Image (cartoon, grey):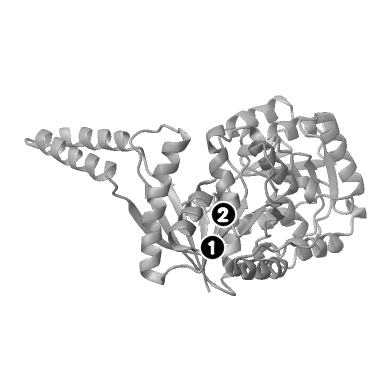
Amino acid sequence: MRVLVVSSEPLNPDDTLGSTFELSQAKLLSKLYDVAILSVSEAVPIKQRLGAALKRRLAEPSGGYLKGLFQTGADFFKHVFGYREVRIHVIEGIAVYEGISSRLTSETEFSAELKNWLAAARAAFLKYREARGSPDLVHAHGRFLKAGVFALENRKAARIPYIYTEHSSFFQRGWAPKIAQQTLLDVIRGAAVYSAVSRSLAKSVEAFLGTAVRKPEILPNVVDPAFERNPADFPSAPPFVFIQVASLDVNKGVDLLLRAFAKAFGTGPACTLTICGDGPMRSELQALAESLGISSAVRFAGKLTKDDVRRQIDNAHALVLSSRIETFGVVLIEALARGRPVIATRCGGPEDIVEAHNGILVDCDNVPQLADALQRMTRDAATYDRDGIRQVALRRYGAAAFLERMQPIYQHALAGGVVTLSA
């Protein structure tokens, strides 16, 4: 059976983070099916690109001006009237068909953005079909919506059934445009199976739609097999090592964690905090750690590979997720799969993951609660059943559990039905 996984986010050798969920799942599904991924990346807006090209050509020797005008005009019409570039990659053993979306300007109005994305996706789909034939099933991952619209379009045109899995935090953040309500409803109704990665997200989708929709299946993300390998021994202490793996932006709440860490431990050497990831707030967060007097205990490790993240988790005693909004929280299941207890905020997805046996939940934006949880974790970490944490995580989120869950769903989708999972 040929399965085409469609991501709403970019995926290419230079950017695997945006579609990491889709890539992890595709690698596992490839054990059973012929699997490829379709993705779309946005090129630099046409006006900006053409302006730069014209500027370069104007600087050429004699004749460059006319040549520049002619070539720039040709490029303009080529892109405006439907030209789309498609690149084909193999990433971690999975074929990826990447459509390059061309846009006249950098405007972000929903309808225009969707139209542009779909044009690039169609071009990538043609390349996929030329190479492999039509898919038997499409699995579309929505972040935000685009893959679902593409899947619906193909179902109408070619009767290809699809599964739609919702990931987008737009609903919880209030970013989902009202103009998209009917489109989303059509996508959900057209899917053989509609699913969401957490109960919190499913409720947010229904609230956005403002009307009753079919009950979604709750399909949690899968822990990447790299994290299923036998973990290293629990590190000795002191110091007690906390780790956070996150993009350094406002939503991830690293500022809250730094303030809570300072409140819990002051400038003492008994605990350290390793922050893995990069982002627009890095300099600001480093300055905050300095102003709080904890810079000697906090290490900014930067953007790391998957294997490096695994090693950093193995070198830590506990992981902290201090986000303001999460649809799921993959870093949590990665840490649990390594037998590490976790601390997380009640920001959506973590409420489905964190329980008394594996960690502590605290309210969002609550520095005193987070500080207390950090202190409790240093006292109680040794009392957690680390092997038990790992085994439960693998039973729920591991590769075998994922494939066992997905096979009947795919079978029902092909048969035109909807499967209801047991809790």
Q: Is residue 361 among what the camera can see?
A: yes
- For the C terminus, the quadrant is bottom right
311 shown above or below 405: above
Q: Please give left or right for residue 386 compared with residue 177 in the image.
A: right
Where residue 6 appears, as percent x and y from the top left, is 51, 57
Give the side of residue 244 with respect to residue 238, left or right.
left
Residue 51 is left or right of residue 344, and the answer is left
Q: How packed is label 2: few (under 14 Cα within 10 Å), some, or many (20 or more)?
A: many
Q: Is residue 241 visible?
A: no
Q: Residues within 10 Å of mark 1 (few under 14, many from 20)?
A: many
Question: In front: 118, or 392?
Answer: 118
Residue 30, x across and y down, in percent: 56, 71
Marks 1/2: CA–CA distance: 9 Å
Look at label 2 and name its amino acid. Gly
Snapshot quadrant of residue 43? top left
> Which of pointers 1 and 2 lies earlier in the amino acid sequence?
1
- Nearer to the camera, 252 or 196: 196
> Which mark is drawn over residue 190?
2
Above or below for 79 versus 407: above
Q: What label does residue 161 carry, if any?
A: 1
Q: Secondary structure at mark 2?
A: helix
Question: Which residue is at a point 87% across and 45% down the rendered structure image?
Answer: 377
Residue 65, given in percent of the width and then of the height, sits at: 12, 33
Judge whether 233 appears above or below 301 on screen: below
Q: Quadrant of residue 344?
A: top right
Give percent across and percent down for residue 402: 69, 65
Q: Residue at x 20, y 38 (%)?
A: 72
Element class at badge 1: loop
